[in-house]
Amino acid sequence: MVFGGKTIAKLTLALLMGAGLLAQAPARYKVKMTTSKGDMVIEVTRAWAPQAADRFYTLVRDHYFDNSRFFRVVAGRWAQFGIAGKPAVAQAWRTRTFPDDTPPFQKNLRGTIAFAFAVPNGRTTELYINLRHNIPQDSQGFAPFGEITSGMEVADQLNSSYGEKSGGGIRAGHQDALFSGGDSYLDSHFPGLDKIIKVRIVK
């Protein structure tokens, strides 16, 4: 059977979407994040960072963030999450990178959310909430794609007692235990970390 170029392109797109690797998000959408400290609502604006908005949309629809932890919270700076609680799921997504959104169209203002990364075009699933204006992040290429419109006080109250000790950022290179051990590792070594119970698209 012979396929034309357009047919192959359509088949490739279908396979990617079927594998959960690609899903175009609406121009705007809201997500409700239920945590151990309360609820937050994140409003995503795709025009700010289309690639990031699409990846976040895919992960939320796949329930990727459910029952995971805010593993890196530095008071007054940021709160990081995005390593799945189940090791098999976290490992499967660890290398599924997506292209950078360049240049960033939105500043890293308090309440905005962006994907963390270590190398160009290396973003996967880890995100952070800006707990203050983190303007220096702009020039480093960190591209916010949404902002907390309700529940910012919840983000401010997330347990920051462990700081960088419970995983650190991607660039520090201390996250292997989180990927291999998941929730069990974090709950045994850092039991006070706040939890993401579930994340859902707001209808």
Image (cartoon, rainbow, N blue to C red):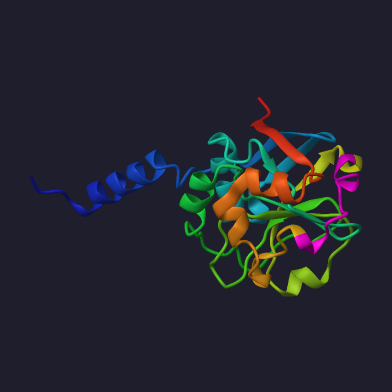
Residue 31 shows in the view: no
Residue ranking furthest to the front: 188
Instruction: Give the quadrant of residue 78.
Output: bottom right
Task: State the count of labels.
Answer: 0
Q: Residue at x 70, y 56 (%)?
A: 114
- Please report the residue visible at 74 percent of the width from the left and 57 percent of the height from the top: 166
User: Along the line of sight, which residue is nearer the eye, 94 or 97?
Assistant: 94
Location of residue 125 in the rendering, given as x and y in whole percent from the top left corner: 59, 53
Q: Residue furthest left?
A: 1
- Residue in the foreground of this view, choosing between 56 and 189: 189
Range covered by the magenta-colored residues: 154-165
Query: Horizontally, is 196 left or right of 22 in the view?
Result: right
Q: Residue at the spot x=61%, y=58% of the render?
A: 177
Q: Which quadrant is home to the C terminus?
A: top right
The vertical placement of 131 against 63, above or below, is below
Q: Position of residue 48 (x, y in %)?
A: 68, 55
- Position of the N terminus, as image quadrant, is top left
Report the front residue among 144 and 95: 95
Regarding residue 15, the answer to whether it shows in the image is: yes
Q: Is residue 74 above or below residue 155?
A: below
Residue 189 at x, y = what percent?
Answer: 73, 51
Which image quarter: residue 26? top right
Q: Position of residue 6 (x, y in %)?
A: 25, 50
Q: Is residue 137 magenta?
A: no
160 falls in the magenta region: yes
Q: Residue furthest top?
A: 203
